[in-house]
């Protein structure tokens, strides 16, 4: 036997009625606020979440009691009132209570055309939305009699004449619609909990039809795309609900417009009243609202007001404008903007109104949008850039040698990879839109074709649009709109910087990335990956010569040619950062990543080195590793071939001397990668210190520097007390640390990650969001043990997690000094850190 749910009494919305958003939903609470502001809101009754749940089980409230609250013979509307309007809900149903008798009365009062229009609308919506009949049978009919006959033919009974039954059935159908599986899945996709409740509001109709000026419309006072002050909306005479927005024919502009008549000209008093209500909403409700209104015989009625649906750039502009007008505080403006919403302002985006023909879907690895012609190689991307033709680089997966092509491309699409794959990390650093792990695509590099899951074939040169914010590739050239990183954006982040209490640095490997970091007010560079400096064509051949050198003196001779190039790199970085800290990671990847693959590429290398192709092939094969991520890389490379790190250290120190001479002295931070034991740090640090001493002697200049460690192995985290004794800082590389803690390849995990997350094995992709209880525990242990050995040690994370708000919250709680993320994630991190500080301060004030 089904357990009965106790039905709460319905509540007329008055200024003092016990209406709450948590019990009755956002619409009901907003209507109460409008009533308190003396707006002309028709009489309204609110039904709570609990009441609607009871109705869904067959328990009806006192329907007659609800009807008795309204004027005799009044027509009613019912609208949904969920906790969050974005969660959706069943559509409004108007003109409840329309019967043959009421139709005759309205015909005498307003004329038969008005009465027929009201009745037709109700019969149609009741048949389709309440009785669930075929819409085609009713939308095709114009005659009221035909509609009623169609209803009877489908149900074997006449259209209901009892207002009590009409209202009861409307309430029942709307409650069941909310509880349906489809509706539940849709709202959960928008962030609603599985048990989210629905409230309903029953409101007396302002009819919007009749011989005197009557109609309906919607008005708002900001542009929803930009947030600039601008009156927008439409008004349609002899209409109801939102007809004005759905029927362009006959609709009026609201303000004076050369394209046609306006409400401002036809009904200036009503227009002025609406503008006054809009200003009241802004100043008293502290929000930009969209007002739904009806005019009945020249009298204005406000039916509803909801927060203007807007883009993120408009959201920022509105929050800043409200704070500048002292309607809200600066702290509240900061708290109103979700950090990840800033991505929409930082990059070009697909226009909200653009038509989307989706070719393929994958992981949204780097936000933004770009249009270009498909190319399948880095060389083709560079050739396209030389012709000043935008292109989208499509690869099965990117390799380090593809960095040049990624620099040249407008966007990157890969078949494989996840959030921390090579393509994703580099694209985020470059600010280039990127989609990885694209599903169901066949790439034929020989034929230079791409076949989508639905059978469409794309060729090199075909135009596509990449949406890195949604993880989609779209057919053809799609309308985009430009970034918005000035004005309100800068103002908001300026306010954020005054309250945040953790440093934000950027990962930057090139001058362009460093300039981007400066543009976004990063507090320095927290990770400069030097390997990316060697993939320039001129340097790559020198690097390969060094790899093929058999003796230490031969390697040193080749490295002497790389030295001035590296020194110039660091001089440029130091000049851009103008005295801010720059943390440089010494060479990390295994040497085979600098070598080509494929017969043609090996032949070219043999010619460049003047060596037999057999010798080149043999050396390349000898350097190949079964598991390169755990092989001869990082500090192991520096100990086995010390000349490399010595050259890099000299380049750093000579650039440091130059920075002192230029008037922007820099104290570089040198980071040793992939450390596992204390002795590794001692050996490399001894060589670095010796190079520093030599440069001081040669130049007569004095300078400061720090040597620290990138903690990316579990053992380094567990033995952080030993390692910290030889280190000025510990910077946790959470990308590799996550790989090693889980035993997962970040490049291959995307093959099964969706299944793991969907089935609840992992709550989130650990490469996307820091695993607080697992990997986070290693960070916590490392931080605590590092401080035990060296209380003044500087702690940070420099993996891709550093741009995630939840990960920043964890770092603040553990007491890290800064986080370092991709340049285009710096604004997100600055805002997230500020919101955390404000929330802590607010909570402290409440204690």
Image (cartoon, helix red, strand yellow):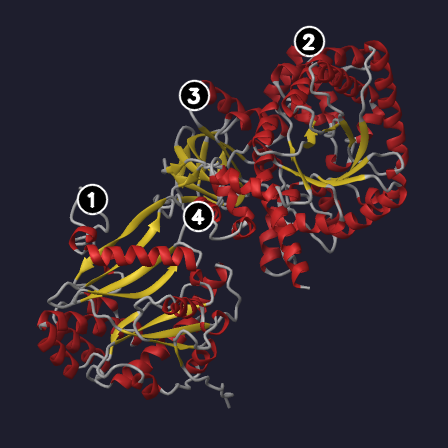
Q: CA distance from mark 2 to mark 3?
A: 35 Å
User: Is 361 on the left or on the right of 518, as rendered?
Assistant: left
Give whichever of discs 4 and 1 has the lower sequence position.
1
- Contact between marks 1 and 3 (CB within 8 A): the answer is no
Give whichever of discs 1 and 3 has the lower sequence position.
1
Q: Which residue is mark 2?
A: 610
Q: Quadrant of residue 473?
A: top left
Which marked residue is nearer to the observer: mark 2 or mark 4?
4
Which marked residue is nearer to the observer: mark 1 or mark 2?
1
Residue at 77% in and 47% down: 779
Q: CA distance from mark 1 to mark 2?
A: 75 Å
Q: CA distance from mark 4 to mark 1?
A: 25 Å
Query: Dividing the image into 4 quarters, which one contains the C terminus?
Result: bottom right
Q: Which residue is mark 4?
A: 318
In the rendered image, residue 346, in percent from the top left (x then y), is placed at 50, 38
Q: CA distance from mark 2 to mark 4?
A: 65 Å
Disc 4, SS: helix
- Contact between marks 1 and 2 (CB within 8 A): the answer is no
Give whichever of discs 4 and 3 has the lower sequence position.
4
Q: Which residue is mark 1?
A: 257
Q: CA distance from mark 4 to mark 3?
A: 37 Å
Is residue 725 among the parts visible in the rendering?
A: yes
Which marked residue is nearer to the observer: mark 2 or mark 3?
3
């Amino acid at each position: 036997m089904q357990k009965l749910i106790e039905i709460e009494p319905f509540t007329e919305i008055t200024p003092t009625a016990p209406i709450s958003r948590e019990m009755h939903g956002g619409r009901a609470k907003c209507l109460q606020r409008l009533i308190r502001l003396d707006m002309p809101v028709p009489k309204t009754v609110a039904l709570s979440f609990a009441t609607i749940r009871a109705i869904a089980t067959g328990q009806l409230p006192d329907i007659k009691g609800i009807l008795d609250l309204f004027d005799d013979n009044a027509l009613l509307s019912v609208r949904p009132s969920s906790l969050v309007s974005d969660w959706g809900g069943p559509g409004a149903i108007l003109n409840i209570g329309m019967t043959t008798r009421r139709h005759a009365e309205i015909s005498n009062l307003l004329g038969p055309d008005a009465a027929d229009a009201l009745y037709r609308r109700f019969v149609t919506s009741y048949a389709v939305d309440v009785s669930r009949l075929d819409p085609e049978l009713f939308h095709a009919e114009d005659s009221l009699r035909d509609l009623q006959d169609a209803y009877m033919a489908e149900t074997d009974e006449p259209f209901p004449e009892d207002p009590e039954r009409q209202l009861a059935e409307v309430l029942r159908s709307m409650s069941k619609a909310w509880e349906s599986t489809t509706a539940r899945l849709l709202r959960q996709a928008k962030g609603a909990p599985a048990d989210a409740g629905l409230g309903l509001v029953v409101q007396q109709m302002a009819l919007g039809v009749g011989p005197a000026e009557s109609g309906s419309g919607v008005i708002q006072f900001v542009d929803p795309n930009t947030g600039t002050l601008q009156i927008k909306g439409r008004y349609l005479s002899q209409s109801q609900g939102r007809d004005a927005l759905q029927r362009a024919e006959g609709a009026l502009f609201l303000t004076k417009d050369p394209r046609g008549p306006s409400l401002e000209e036809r009904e200036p008093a009503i227009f002025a009243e609406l503008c006054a209500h809009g200003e009241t909403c802004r100043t008293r409700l502290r929000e930009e609202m969209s007002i739904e209104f009806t005019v009945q015989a020249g009298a204005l009625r406000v039916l509803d007001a909801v927060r203007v649906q807007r883009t993120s750039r408009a959201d920022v502009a509105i929050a800043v404008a409200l704070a500048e007008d002292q309607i809200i505080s600066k702290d509240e403006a900061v708290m109103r903007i979700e950090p990840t919403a800033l991505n929409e302002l930082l990059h070009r985006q697909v226009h909200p109104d653009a038509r989307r023909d989706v070719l393929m879907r994958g992981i949204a690895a780097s936000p933004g949008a770009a249009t270009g012609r498909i190319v399948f190689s880095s060389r083709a991307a560079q050739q396209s850039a030389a012709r000043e033709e935008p292109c989208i680089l499509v690869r099965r997966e990117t390799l380090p040698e593809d960095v040049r092509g990624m620099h040249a491309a407008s966007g990157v699409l890969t078949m494989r990879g996840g959030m921390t794959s090579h393509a994703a990390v580099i694209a985020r650093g470059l600010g280039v839109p990127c989609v990885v792990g694209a599903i169901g695509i066949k790439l034929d590099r020989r034929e230079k074709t791409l076949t989508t899951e639905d059978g469409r074939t794309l060729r090199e040169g075909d135009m596509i649009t990449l949406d890195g914010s949604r993880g989609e590739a779209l057919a053809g050239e799609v309308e985009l709109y430009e970034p918005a990183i000035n004005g309100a954006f800068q103002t908001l982040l300026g306010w954020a910087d005054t309250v945040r209490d953790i440093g934000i640095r950027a990962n930057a490997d090139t001058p362009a990335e460093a300039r981007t970091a400066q543009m976004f007010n990063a507090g320095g560079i927290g990770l400069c990956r030097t390997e990316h400096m060697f993939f320039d064509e001129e340097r790559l051949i020198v690097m390969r010569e060094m790899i093929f050198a058999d003796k230490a003196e031969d390697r040193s001779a080749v490295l002497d040619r790389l030295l001035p190039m590296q020194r110039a790199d660091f001089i440029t970085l130091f000049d851009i950062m103008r005295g801010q800290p720059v943390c440089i990671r010494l060479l990390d990847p295994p040497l085979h990543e600098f070598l080509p693959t494929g017969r043609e590429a090996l032949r070219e290398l043999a010619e460049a080195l003047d060596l037999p192709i057999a010798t080149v092939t043999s050396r390349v094969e000898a350097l190949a590793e079964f598991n390169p991520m755990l092989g001869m890389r990082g500090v192991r490379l520096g100990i086995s071939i010390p000349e490399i790190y010595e050259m890099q250290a000299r380049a750093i120190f000579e650039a440091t001397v130059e920075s002192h001479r230029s008037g922007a002295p820099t104290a570089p931070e040198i980071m040793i990668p992939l450390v596992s034991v204390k002795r590794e740090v001692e050996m490399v640090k001894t060589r670095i210190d010796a190079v520093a001493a030599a440069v001081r002697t040669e130049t007569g200049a004095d300078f400061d520097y720090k040597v620290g460690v990138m903690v990316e192995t579990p053992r380094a985290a567990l033995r952080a007390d030993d390692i910290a004794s030889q280190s000025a800082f510990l910077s946790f590389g959470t990308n590799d640390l996550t790989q090693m803690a889980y035993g997962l390849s970040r490049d291959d995990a995307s093959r099964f990650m969706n299944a793991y997350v969907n089935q609840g094995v992992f709550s989130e992709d650990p490469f996307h969001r820091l695993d607080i209880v697992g990997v986070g525990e290693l960070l916590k242990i490392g931080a605590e043990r590092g401080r035990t050995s060296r209380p003044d040690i500087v702690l940070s994370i420099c993996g891709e997690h550093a741009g995630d708000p939840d990960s920043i919250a964890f770092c603040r709680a553990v007491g890290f000094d800064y986080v370092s993320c991709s340049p285009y994630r710096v604004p997100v991190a600055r805002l997230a850190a500020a919101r955390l500080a404000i929330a802590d301060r607010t909570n402290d004030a409440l204690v």
